[in-house]
Image (spheres, rainbow, N blue to C red):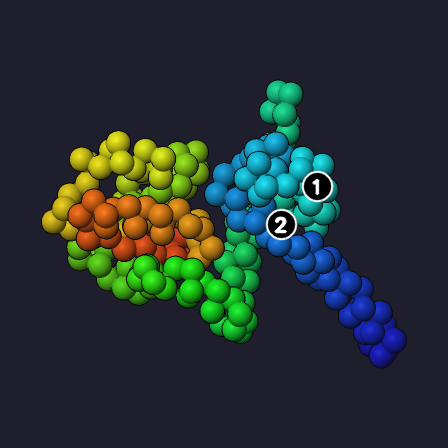
Amino acid sequence: MSNSKSRTFKNAAYTHLAQVGKALSSPARLEILELLAQAPRTVEVLASEIDQSVANTSHHLQALKRAQLVASERDGTHIAYSIGSSDVATLLVQLQAVAARHIAGLEKLTREFFDDPTGLEAIDRETLVERLRASDVVLLDVRPELEFSEGHLPGAVSMPLPVLESRISELPKDRTIVAYCRGPFCTFSAEATQRLRELGFDARRTDVSVHSLDATGVQP
């Protein structure tokens, strides 16, 4: 095989690979992917959740769609967007993990937001798995019901943040409550944990999400 043919192949291959990198090079698009990894949404719903105009959100969705990171399907008069495949969600989880390890500013930002001064540091994956196997905790999914219905950690109880206080009597006070949501940058679990502590519960949060922990890893 000639060097020129090999170089032509490599140039073309890395050009295709760069399309994915280009599609991911936007904070808004990364947040869109995180939301779509939880459940399908329309452009209007996404625009509201990421605090951008419908026009800007549509532009971001088209960029993600060109890279085949998202898919779309017409639902009556609306178009519902979804994650392109489960490996796209896995890619997002790995990107978050690599950034947390290598970008000092990100680690400092998340530590200051969650840990200081409220002490809301997250239970790590290994500790969570161990305590779930020992039936030592109640795992609380505080995402919206739609996201829970699309997929959740085994044994988790759905209790969306807006209804947490109205359903507080359903939770035991003799076990630790561990709240989870969408991942390391989702604040629902921190808000739930803080409120539960104020109400007298032994509550913790975790960064573990549906896509960051294999289902088989949390079986007792």
Whether tag 2 and tag 1 are in contact, CB under 8 A, the answer is yes
> In this rendering, would 101 be left or right of 79?
left
Q: Nearer the viewer, residue 36 or 85?
A: 36
Question: Between marks 2 and 1, how big is the CA–CA gap?
Answer: 9 Å
Residue 38 position within the rendered picture, expressed as x and y whole percent measured from the top left: 48, 43
> At label 2, which amino acid type do we have?
Ala
Q: Give me the residue at 57% from left, 43% from top.
A: 50
Q: In terms of image quadrants, where is residue 12?
A: bottom right
Question: Image quadrant for the C terminus?
Answer: bottom left
Q: Which mark is residue 28?
A: 2
Disc 2 or 1, which lies upstream in sequence?
2
> In this rendering, would 187 be left or right of 124?
right
Q: Most extreme residue toward the right, as rendered?
A: 4
Q: Which residue matches tag 1?
A: 56
> At label 1, which amino acid type do we have?
Asn
Kind of element beneath mark 2: helix
Residue 149 visible: no
> In this rendering, would 139 be left or right of 69?
left
Q: Give me the residue at 36% from left, 64% from top.
A: 116
**Neighbours of disc 2 within 10 Å: few (<14), some (14-19), many (20+):** some
Relative to residue 220, is residue 3 depicted above or below? below
Q: Most extreme residue toward the left, as rendered?
A: 174
Residue 142 position within the rendered picture, expressed as x and y whole percent measured from the top left: 35, 42
Q: In terms of image quadrants, where is residue 36?
A: top right
